[in-house]
Amino acid sequence: MKNIVILGSTGSVGTQTLEVIDRHRDVFNVYGLACGSNVDLLSKQVAKYKVAHTAVADPKEAMALVRDPAVDLVVFAMSHTADALSIFRTALESGAQIAMATKEVVIEYGPAVAEFVIGKGSQASEAQTSATYTRCRQVIPLDSEMSATFQILQNAPARTIKTLYLPCTGGPFYGRTRDELQSVTVEQALTHPRWKMGRKISIDSATLMNKAFEIIEAAYLFDLKPAQIKVFIEPEARIHSVVEFDDGSFVTHRDEPDMRRPIEYALLYPNGVASFAACLSYEKPVMPEPDYGVFPSPLLAYRALGASISPRTLITEDSRAVQNFLDGKISFLEIYKTIMRNLQET
């Protein structure tokens, strides 16, 4: 039995992780659960899975959970907090595998995370090969795009990566003009055509800011330069990653748009993932670029990785602007304008 601790068990990723565990009760044991404030749901989870170890809004208790030598895997799906990096570091040092969903930790503390995960600073001058990431199997990404990229690199021989292409559905407003976005409501922006997500990430998906964060995340997780990462539109959300190697070959990852799939891969890894190889095909799909004139947010990633702005500041200003939109204080189009104005003032 694999003992699993879930940090953020009452959130979207946490509850879906438990759904996956329900399919494999003979393989996984829910050893510990942690949440921020949803104590009622946590209590129900504790009762259902007979969990003996819990933490509620307490970083020290969370660190104690991930430090326990009995833990085999930590699902890191907790909210982004000031203590997140310390908890992540503690989990790594414990030797447990980490299924990583909290992308803000990777983005905000990128060089430090790259040092933990890759064992050297990010964006190294040497060629990035698929073998580079085989050293990093203690951390398995949970984001669909990062998981798909991980799967491609785990199934590829040691070949040099030329370009990573990250897919983007375009969000709920794909194909609209700026004029058509003038009167967008909060409810419309929260309605993603493919994914069921929390409020903050749903708005980031609508503005395509989530792609900016994924570009930064991929650069640090996979030791890539900014110019090696591109975004393309794929409205059906069935392509999750495309990697081009320097020999001109492509590997494409296709799967259902279901967050439980990358979660299941991470929980089963390294055993029991052979069936996921069927998701890979050796083809170059059609990959149209986003309309950056209407949705310019992804371009901010290259500025953040180029050090003209800090990823931490980008996260902070985006969070503030999104919350102002959710509170009805600014319009949808003013999210980007507000972020840019505040970035220029910092």
Image (cartoon, grey):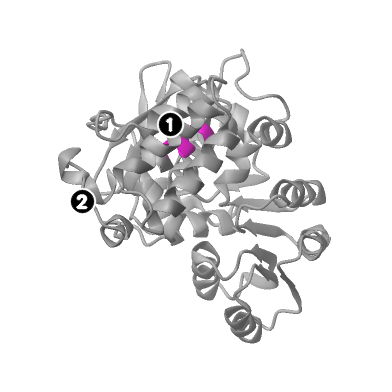
Kind of residue sitting beneath label 2: Ser
Q: Which mark is residue 104?
A: none
Kind of residue sitting beneath label 1: Met
The residue at 37%/35% (across/down) is 337
Q: Quick one: SS at disc 2?
A: loop
Q: Is residue 205 above or below residue 220?
A: below
What range is drawn magenta here?
A: 211-216
Query: Within the image, what quadrant is residue 245 found in?
Result: top left
The spot of residue 284 in percent (x, y) is 28, 29
333 relative position to 216: left or right:
left
The residue at 58%/59% (across/down) is 267
Reply yes or no: does residue 94 show up in magenta: no
Q: Is residue 52 above or below residue 110?
A: below
Query: Is residue 312 in view?
Result: yes
Which secondary structure type mostly characterizes the magenta part of the structure? helix
Placement of the N terminus among the 4 image quadrants: bottom right
Say which residue label 2 marks.
Answer: 183
Neighbor class of circle 2 (other Cα within 10 Å; few <14, some 14-19, many 20+) is few
Q: Is residue 45 above or below residue 88?
A: below
Q: Nearer the viewer, residue 38 or 88?
A: 38
Q: Quick one: SS at disc 1?
A: helix
Q: Nearer the viewer, residue 105 or 272?
A: 105
Neighbor class of circle 1 (other Cα within 10 Å; few <14, some 14-19, many 20+) is some
The spot of residue 48 in percent (x, y) is 60, 85
Say which residue label 1 marks.
Answer: 340
Q: Please, which residue is most extreme toward the top here?
A: 125
146 relative position to 188: left or right:
right
Marks 2 and 1 in Cβ contact (< 8 Å): no
The residue at 29%/31% (across/down) is 283
The spot of residue 112 in percent (x, y) is 71, 33
